[in-house]
Amino acid sequence: MKRRDAVIALLAAPALAAPVWAQQTVKQFSGKALDSTSGQWLYTEQHRQVWDGDRWLSGTIRYVTPQGQLMAEKSLDFSQDRFIPLTRMAQAAVGHEEAITKITADAVTMETSDGGQRKTDDVKRSSPMAADSGFHSFVVANFDALMAGKTVTLAFGVVSQRTTFRFRIKKTDVVEQGGQTRVSLLAEPDSLLRLLAAPLKLVYDGKTRDLLEYDGLSNLTDPATRKTPSVRIVYDYAKG
């Protein structure tokens, strides 16, 4: 993967064990991923999340083609850290797998495998830090500050690159549409890397704090081109 692919990351394989919590709710929804340029329907994300109040505990994501064929799977376990999950994603068609296998007070162990060649790095922790899909939990936890106009920064762990990048997030717009408050956020590298890579554009529901839209690099590789496409993902919470 190219270095610029590391910028996103945003937005899967055997499920990791999660602890038993007192009160759990299950949220299921889908996201339709369209090519940012052509509008072609590339794949659908099928999400299943387990929550305890406002804390995301664990979940899975299945990535399927428009015809319903499985492309990749991801598992997520937030039992050790609210913003850094134990996670594993496998995309068999391109022989790629990536994971966070260990979290300590000082480091996060990130692992990738391409064509059977496995690499592992212990990435130094900093504060605040989020990794992989924990980026969403970090945004939700800082939503009030973002709504107040503050710029929030963090170290974002990109598993595919086995490293972290400094990111900054800020609110760019708030629109009332159809009885819904749509909050637009911009997430970009907090370094000169932003001159080389496009930012992430996110739209959240101001009331539920659900992610409504994502615009940026996919976290899947196109099997035909071996490149990472830019996608616009629209999420539907009415059906899983």
Image: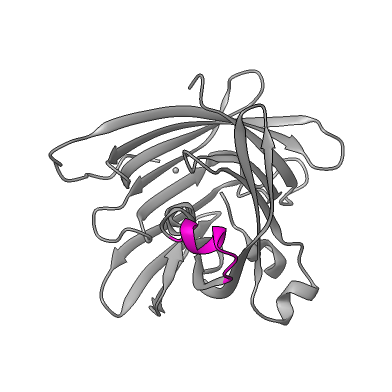
Query: Residue 205 at x, y = what percent?
Result: 55, 40
Q: Is residue 191 magenta?
A: no
Residue that appears at 38% across and 60% down: 83
Q: Is residue 149 magenta?
A: yes
Q: Which of 184 and 119 lies nearest the eye of the viewer? A: 184
Q: Quadrant of the N terminus?
A: bottom right
Q: Indicate the colouring scheme.
A: one colour
Residue extending furthest toward the right: 38
Query: Residue 13 at x, y = what percent?
Result: 40, 41
**Occupied quadrant, residue 5:** bottom right
Above/below status of 80 relative to 230: below
Q: Is residue 141 left or right of residue 235?
A: left
Query: Residue 110 at x, y = what percent?
Result: 42, 66
Residue 117 visible, this orientation: no
Above/below status of 82 relative to 161: above
Residue 93 visible, this orientation: yes
**Occupied quadrant, residue 42:** top right
Q: Which of 105 and 91 lies nearest the eye of the viewer? A: 105
Q: Is residue 171 left or right of residue 157?
A: right
Residue that appears at 48% across and 45% down: 90
Q: Which of 188 and 99 lies nearest the eye of the viewer? A: 188
The tally of labels here is 0
Query: Residue 217 at x, y = what percent?
Result: 69, 52
Q: Which of 105 and 1 lies nearest the eye of the viewer? A: 105
Magenta residues span 142-151
